């Protein structure tokens, strides 16, 4: 009787130990989402071209893969900038692969609709402009020769614009986050 109890107790300890090992291995090898940061955003504020022409905004986007053991395949990525409820401009970044533990810098520009451009220039001159940015894409992780299923990414952020047409405030880098109730306000 005593041997049976000690054997089942020993077997239970082994099963619990294996369970903890598997759990901690799963936690350590689970891939993390990439981080997106708007590093620079710039609008020309000179009076030239404020008529009926479209404006041009330039931006720098930094995409970081924090995973030390998995690369990331990106499908086409859509960046959309909003002023209020109106679309300021859209940009598509073509699909790509990002190596593990690396950062990609994307420098690009977008054309702004003349109707929205006039409103935005007025708000910039009053130093009250705030833009919203949305990033939408799908990713797959590549780890140990295996590619995961597609996972959607839908990130948002707010960019305060100063009277100089650049990012205002103390935070010069805007990290994009998952959708929240703040975005709707």
Image: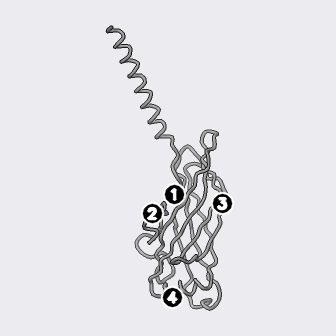
Colouring convention used in this rendered image of the protein: one colour
Q: Position of residue 124 (x, y in %)?
A: 49, 84
SS label for mark 4: helix
| Foreground: disc 2 or disc 3 | 2
C-alpha distance separating marks 2 and 3: 23 Å
* 2 or 3: tag closer to the N-terminus: 3
| Marking on residue 150 | none
How far is the residue under mark 4 from the one under mark 3? 33 Å
- First in sequence, mark 4 or 2: give its number: 4
Asked whether 170 or 81 is in front, the reply is: 81
Q: Which mark is residue 180?
A: 2
Q: Identify the element where label 1 is drawn.
A: strand
Q: Which residue is mark 3?
A: 76
Distance between mark 1 and mark 4 Cα atoms: 32 Å
Cα separation, mark 2 vs mark 1, equals 16 Å
Side of 108 relative to 37 (left or right): right
First along the sequence among labels 4 and 3: 3
Callout in the foreground (3, 1): 3
> What is the tally of numbered marks visible in this picture?
4
**In front: label 2 or label 1:** 2
Horizontal side of 148 relative to 85 (left or right) equals right
Residue at the disc numbered 4: 122
């Amino acid at each position: 009787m005593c041997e049976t109890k000690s054997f089942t107790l020993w077997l239970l300890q082994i099963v619990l130990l294996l369970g903890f090992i598997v759990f901690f291995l799963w936690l350590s090898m689970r891939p993390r989402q990439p981080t997106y940061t708007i590093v620079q955003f710039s609008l020309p504020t000179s009076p030239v071209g404020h008529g009926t022409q479209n404006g041009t905004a330039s931006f720098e986007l930094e995409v970081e893969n924090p995973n030390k053991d998995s690369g990331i395949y990106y499908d086409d990525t859509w960046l959309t900038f909003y002023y209020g409820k109106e679309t300021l401009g859209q940009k598509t970044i073509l699909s790509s692969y990002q190596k593990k533990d690396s950062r990609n810098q994307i420098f690009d520009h977008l054309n702004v609709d003349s109707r929205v451009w006039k409103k935005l220039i007025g708000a910039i001159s009053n130093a009250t402009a705030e833009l919203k940015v949305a990033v939408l894409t799908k990713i797959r992780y590549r780890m140990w020769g295996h590619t995961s299923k597609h996972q959607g990414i839908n990130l948002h952020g707010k960019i305060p614009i100063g009277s100089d047409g650049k990012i205002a405030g103390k935070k010069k880098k805007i990290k994009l986050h998952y959708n929240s109730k703040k975005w709707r306000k």
